[in-house]
Amino acid sequence: MRISTVTIYEQSVSSMNRQQGDFMQVGQQIATGRRVVNPSDDPQAAAQAVATSQAIGITEQYTDSRVAARNSLSQEESVLSSVGDAIAKAKTLIVQGVNGTLSDTDRASVATELEGILETLVGQANATDGNGRFLFGGFSDNSTPFVDDGAGNISYVGDTNNREQRIDASRLMPVSDHGEAVFLSVQNGAGYLAEADMGNTGEAVFTGPLIVDPTDPQFGDSFQVDFVDVAGTMHYSIDGGAPVPYEDGASIEMGGLSLKLEGLPANGDSIQVGPAENMNTDLFATLNKALTALRTSQVDNADTAAFRNSMSTVMRELDNSLDNVLTVQASVGARLNELDVVDGVAENRMLSYRNNLSDLIDLDYTEAISEYSLRQIGLQAAQKSFVDINGMSLFNFLK
Amino acid sequence: MSILSTGVSGLSAAQLALTTTSNNISNVYTPGYNRELTLLEDSRTGAGTEVTGIQRQFDYFTATQLNQANAQLKSLESYEVQINQIDDLLADREAGLAPLMQNFFSALSDLAAAPSDPAARQGVIGTANTLSAQFRSMGDYFDDMQQGINTQIKSEITQINNTADLIAKLNSEIAIARARTGAEPNSLLNRRDQLVAELSERVDVKVYIQDGGAYNVSIGNGQPLVSGSESYQLVAIDSSLEPYKTVVGYEDSAGNVLELQESLFEGGKLGGLMSFRSETLDEVENKVGQLAVSLAMEFNAQHMAGLDIDGDPGQAFFDIDDPVTFASSRNAGSAGFSAVFDDVSQLAGIDYELRVSDATAGEFEVIPGDGSPGFTVTLDGSNQLNVGGVTLTLDDPALLVDGDRFSLLPTRQVASSLDTLIQDGSLVAAGQVGGSGDNLNALALQDLQNSAVVGGDATLSQGYAAIVGDVGNRANIVQVNLAAQSGVTAQIRTLQQSQSGVNMDEEAANLIRYQQYYQANAKVIEVGATVLDTLLGMRA
């Protein structure tokens, strides 16, 4: 076939162009370290790389979120730990205060010490994080959640929301516990409380209540025990039922519970019995009740009976409050553990995402560099052949 | 016939052959030049030789094949130049939409961790500003590309008109030259064939050779562009349904302008530009617009369900334009639609054409742009239609005329309008129930990242990945097709060149040959003269 001179020239040039283009492409890959520079280099890989980069981004985002969550929960845990210590200390003081050998003055000094604990607890309940936000205010974290009415009564003005954070794709974790759940609550099934009426004038002191028959149909109900004088003999009635003669030192049974009573009640006295969650659950009210009792001077047996009943109730309430705080603390600890576990999982996931991304778009340097040399040789060969072919002309021999 | 005249005929033939050879040599690199051969015959009137013509080595069939191959090559080349711009635009992983969306949602996550922190609130606004700026910049880039294509189409049309004019002029010049000399006007023919080749690089044309040898050139559906010595004009006009696009209009002899469908143009630079515009640019613009609308509408809805730091209901966070709709400039009636986004999950990122099938009943035939089956919709009591997640409101049904056409481009050109409305951190609606620590809405906003908000079946990131994959695929296909077409074209070009191209070695050989031929004939004359001298000398 005839080959025109233009064809020879064009083909050499286009061959050089092609070689040069390939050479540049490998050069660009080496310079960027990426096999896929433009989406068109490998559309599937480019699209997957977007998804994988997003997965990496989200994983990092959740990691940041866990840092914040860990921060909040650690602060809460440390406060809860102090709160638990304070309640335990309060319990020790109550035990000291109940001691029958103490005088009014001794009890007053116990009260002073207990008041210090109460103040500590209020302080802890109003603890703030590094940014001045209240830990136990629920969503209302910019105002003091536990306020004193001036007379020493503490009330909760926060709300009952717990802030949550997304710490992983499928996990929304509460990173705070509101004040009501920590300081004004007891766990369900915390047991039973008995509390003597403030106006009682008799000398009856209760012990218990004890659970004797959890299968009783009325088990779990609240009861009121009223004492009435029927024709000169002390009787008691449960929830306004038929009066039953009172026996000193015997136990009263109701709804599977048994309440032991010693001493003679007065006509009109009453005792409330019920599940802890239906009775007072406010830690601060409990402590205030203890303070009032400790500071009341004991003149007669009735005073002593009222004091002992009150302290007995306070003790049980403090037990329940401590249980509650410890439970919340355990749940915070569990959440902190969970954060560690999720961190570990996320790290593995991150590693696999990064490997995946690298497989998708990163360059195999060994391969690329050998390709680079190959292309260089190809380009040089094309250049050489261009020079050779164009140097060959019959005109060279026409002299 | 004497030996002398025989020698002279050879001498002049040799001279002509040398002229032809030198002409070939001098035109070796001239585009459109076809190699010439000196045709010799032994003289019909006696001894000696005769030059019967200088023949142009031109094969019409091969030339037409090469023109068609070149038309496809140029189409793919211009397509590639355009699509590579989008390919490059999406190649930047650091500044692309994906990492900016990620930053935005990370900022929302920070907000959920510290809802009352002014820095976290400002972080959300800052990343939203960057994200919406990137959407705008991408949208602007597409708008610029549309403008660039309009300009190129206009320039192509001017060039096509000029070329058509020249072909028409050459048709008549060639006819005159033939009539005058009886010989083939080779250089005029070369020039005309070269013009047809240039025209094929710009647009699909069909060439018919008339009896007289004139080239008749037609375009599109067979509209004549050159007919003998007449040429007709193409004009750049605004598309009737998408007026921001320049399309090709054909002006007939009565002066009426006919809008030529884009689908009629496949080959040449013009075809490449139009295919790119309808297949890739519109589509990518629609899809990016769909991302922007999905983000803006879904985010706004959730944001407005929340409460800001003062406990007031959240306001719209992002601003985005309404969908674009046009009434055809060729409608008989003058009714018009206005459009608003309705159900974002119904948005499909495609265009629609609405044709009035029954004006009195308010009935429209809807033709989706992706080729899916059409359907019929009817105006409701408040003159509204719902099409593809958009509510269209007709201004006046009385102005509808059967056959009127409307276009609905729900997500075209909206990306460039995305903006962040909220610039005051305290207005970010992080909460739902109130309280400085309330992060419920921040969590809900953050969840949008993993919700199928794009067309109801993809997350924002998946939507973006689909665009990247789609553009990558198209660019890849164009590159592969271009490489294949380059090979095919090079082969045909080699074939055409083997017939019509000049080979310098061959011409060098011819030079030697014809030089010797000339010398031999000169010798013949010398011998003739010697013979004559001998004869004359005998008498003396």
Image: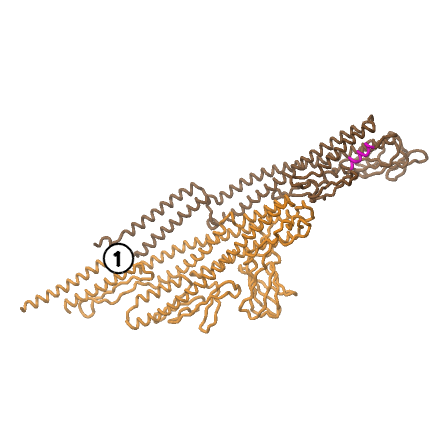
Image quarter hosting the C terminus of chain B: bottom left
Please report the residue visible at 23 percent of the width from the left and 62 percent of the height from the top. Answer: B18
Crowding at dot 1, Cα within 10 Å, few <14 / some 14-19 / many 20+, comes out as some
Residue A168 sits above or below residue A212 on the image:
below
Residue that mark 1 sits on:
B506
The chain shown in brown is which?
A
Left or right placement of residue B496 versus residue B540 in this view: right
Main secondary structure along the magenta-highlighted residues: helix
Residue A322 sits above or below residue B51 on the image:
above
- Say which element carries label 1: helix
Which residue is outermost to the bottom? B254
A291 in magenta: yes
Q: Amino acid at mark 1?
A: Glu
The answer to which of B410 and A96 lies nearer the viewer is A96
Q: Inspect this view and state whether residue B67 appears.
A: yes
User: What segment carries the magenta color?
Assistant: A285-295
